[in-house]
Amino acid sequence: MEVIIHRTKKDFFRFINYWSFERKRNIRLLIFIALSLWTTPSFESIIKGNFFIRFLVILTGYLILMIIAYCINLLLLKKGFKTKKSLLEETIVSVTDEGISTKSVSFHKLILWEEINKIENSTEFIVILHGFRRNILIPKRFFNSQIEADNFYESLQKIYLPKRAYLRSINGKHLYKWAFLGLIPNVGLISGAILAFKGIFVFKDKKLTVIGIASIAFTFIFWFTLLKISNNSQSNIDFSNKLAISKLNDLVKDIEYHKIGSNIYPDNLEQLHNNNSFSLLDPMSLSMSSKEKFVYKKLGDNYTLYSTGLDRIANTKDDLYPSDSIAKPGFIIVK
């Protein structure tokens, strides 16, 4: 089974238009709608028209990216016309048991069935995809009729699909393309677990296993890094500072109440039974991803209470103390 084609520049330009803007158009539209709904905070916002604003923003961003990709493809194609004479030569496309052969005056190559990723059928083209930015483009105008073109496509699929099913049953290469999901936090955690499981137990594929583990690791690294950045942000430090002083003020009250009830200051903060362990934790230490308590020392008939601040070193200028308006008779500052 074979077909003789003689493509022109117009065929390739038309294909780029189709690939960039027409292929899977309905699916792309559904994705835009889903993203717009997902980024719209509430149903009330949808009623107010925020959904349509987000839809237009997402659509505009997508079109900008597509136009940039389209221009890059045009430049690469024009360069290909100069370096690959076979693109515009008469070519015989033959289907064999081993794969699909393309032969012209200056070029001859056999694409094995296992190298083919997908075979697509559009109104104007049959496209055989075999690797990144590699394809065999067959314009349907070289067939005698649309029926003949569709029969050719169906014959390709009858050979290709069983071979693909068999190849996918014995190796996990077809799953490599899902590695990009690993770059989406949380989603990568699920996809990574699935890929790692299939790599270890189903296909015994080391590369697939590594992809899965890397996808899982990326989610943890992403959130750990984000937490570190947010914890060290000035706004978070300011919030922890205010919270620490507020908790110190509350502790002063509890300490003084304890003195009234037992006629003695507590030996440690744990003796304040109405406080749980979390209330004794210094928010300034939590902002640094550690868990340290406020510093409390009983000094005879007095006591001192403070936070060691952001540097976590006592008796430095960033130490925090209870507010002057709250501090009571027994409280003193010891330098």
Image (spheres, grey):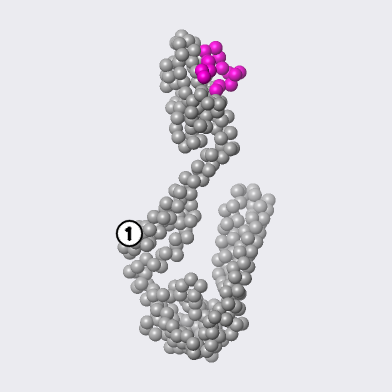
The residue under the point 45% across, 52% down is 218
SS label for mark 1: helix
Q: Position of residue 150 (x, y in %)?
A: 50, 83
Q: Is residue 231 left or right of residue 68?
A: left
Q: Is residue 187 above or below residue 12?
A: above
Q: Is residue 142 above or below residue 16?
A: below
Q: Is residue 299 visible?
A: yes
| Quarter of the rendering containing residue 57 | bottom right
The crowd level at tag 1 (other Cα within 10 Å; few <14, some 14-19, many 20+) is some
Q: Is residue 21 visible?
A: no
The residue under the point 51% across, 18% down is 334
The residue under the point 47% across, 37% down is 289
Pick whichever, 129 or 214, lies toward us: 214
Name the residue tied to disc 1: 200
Majority secondary structure of the magenta segment?
loop
Q: Amino acid at mark 1?
A: Ile
How many marks are shown on the rendered structure?
A: 1
Pick whichever, 133 or 59, lies toward us: 133
Q: Which residues are magenta?
A: 321-335
The residue under the point 40% across, 59% down is 211
Q: Position of residue 143 (x, y in %)?
A: 53, 88
Q: Position of residue 81 (x, y in %)?
A: 57, 81
Q: Position of residue 277 (x, y in %)?
A: 43, 27
Q: Is residue 96 above or below residue 184?
A: below
Examine the structure image and report whether residue 293 is included in the region drawn in magenta. no
Pick whichever, 18 or 219, lies toward us: 219
Examine the structure image and report whether residue 326 is included in the region drawn in magenta. yes
Quarter of the image that includes the N terminus? bottom left
Pick whichever, 204 or 109, lies toward us: 109
